[in-house]
Amino acid sequence: MRQVTRAIVLWCPDWPVIAARQRLELPADVPLALVEKGMVFACSSHARADGVTRGLRVREAQSRCPELEVVLYDPVLDARAFEPVLTAIEEITPGVQAVRPGTCVLRARGPARYYGGEEAAAAELLRCLEGLEDVTGLALDDVRVGIADGPFAAEQAARSTGAAPSMGMAQTAPRVRVVPPGGSPAFLAPLPVAQLGLTELTPLLRRLGLRTLGDLARLDRLDVRERFGERGEHAHDLASGMDGAAVVPRTPPKMLDRAIEFEPPLDRVDQVTFAFRGTAEQFVAGLTKAGLVCTSLRIEVTDERGRLSERSWQHPRLFSASDVVDRVRWQLQGAGSIDSGLASPIAKVAVAPEAVDDIGHHEDGLWGGGADERIHHGLTRVQGMLGHDAVVTATIGGGRALSDRQVLVPWGDRPVGVARSDRPWPGSLPAPAPSTVFEVPRPVAVLSASGEPVEVTDRGDVTAPIVSFSPTGAARDARPVDSWAGPWPVRERWWDATLARAMHRFQLVDADGTAWLLALTGAAWFAEARYD
């Protein structure tokens, strides 16, 4: 007989929406949808009331709810916002395991013995989270608790709160459901097989007539394993209430973040950075003591009005104390120069690591760091004197236009929001690429034998053969054309009137033997690049 752990699961419905609403400071009655890859990932109850559901395309969701607030889903924000919830639970009972942002599980035995029963433990957990708003501003008005044999059954019990009690399930409070020991199989039996969360296996089970967990549990376990393999055996265990998954308590993260408050608030950039230097040294010293280095950090600046400015910063190697101070200064310089006043005095500056690495991976070699380290220190020094955007590195992004693929990134930052070059780009220029790409396309003239500009018809045909070409756009500079090829049509974002772009590309070799990449937009000719 497999050992099954008695578990308590806390579930926060619509957690991604709660986290995003807190971050954006949106009112509770605003319909909100979080979007990922053009589809609705999560939505608020007000949005669902207007017919918005998970999996809808953005346009369809907006047509159903015109006042819908659409926000990109941020999994990092999702996880970071759940951290105070886990910390609050650990203050009253140890051993919490995060299943996913918005859902966590604990062993039921310890809290039940300490608080005098499983129902009492659940009530204490709810009371703890209800007081979280006073500390963090995070309002958790609808936390659900499920208690059962195994984490899977406990989570289903938490998700079933608000419905009529099923057989073998007790409702002790509107937000708490307790499945008695040994009652998990009967509780799970009427639930649909979709509750297993196995997207590839669920359609097959339905086609075989296995529509509920009870239907699957009644099959022989060995037969299920022979037919569906290990995934099927695991699904059978879950449906039978024999979830053997252990509850593995998380290791509470070390407090590596640092903050400093100013009383009275400071209204000059140089004052803030000078006062923050000691905090930056404490931040780096704390990382070193933990055997870590920081390669990405988050800086939060709060002014006296309570407005928060938050930004993430990356480093090509690791952050030193002076690097952290530089990032604070650069973030503040958006509101004023180093020796000027700020729009609003600063009351608090906080820094927290977002990505850390073992310090042993960044130790200097036996003979020093070499040329790469000297280059890094030199560029960092110039950047510190001239500003964050003064030193940039070039990288190649994705896109159909050559000018779109040239991306300049501040030294130390990773490309963020840049189209990936390894994705397919239908209509993009094949290799070899031109050696000279014009930052601003140059107006040129492409002429027929009669001296008239050549155009492209709606059917994609040129109105006349190309005979001459002027790299300056003036007819007096026209020169004969040896050969040409095209047109190749490119249409982008035709569904968006503000971002739509349409053009026809040509390759052309003039009498001097110089090859050009040309683009015809409407009736205007431009040179995108030159093959030197």
Image (cartoon, rainbow, N blue to C red):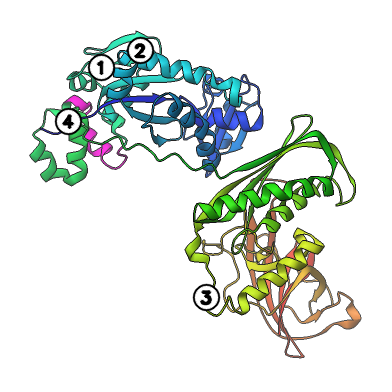
Q: Nearer the viewer, residue 527 or 146?
A: 146
- The quadrant where residue 514 appears: bottom right
- The quadrant where residue 187 appears: top left
Magenta region: 198-214
Q: For this view, does 61 lie left or right of residue 120?
A: right
Q: Earlier in the sequence, mark 1 or mark 3?
A: 1
Mark carried by residue 365: 3
Is residue 307 one of those drawn in magenta?
A: no
Name which residue type carries label 1: Val
Q: Earlier in the sequence, mark 4 or mark 1?
A: 1
**Residue 161 in sight:** no
Mark carried by residue 179: 1
What's the distance in space between the residues labelled 3 and 4, CA to CA? 59 Å
Name which residue type carries label 3: Gly
Q: For this view, does 309 lie left or right of residue 193?
A: right
Q: Nearer the viewer, mark 1 or mark 3?
A: 3
Q: Secondary structure at mark 2?
A: helix
Name which residue type carries label 4: Leu
The residue that label 2 is drawn on is 120
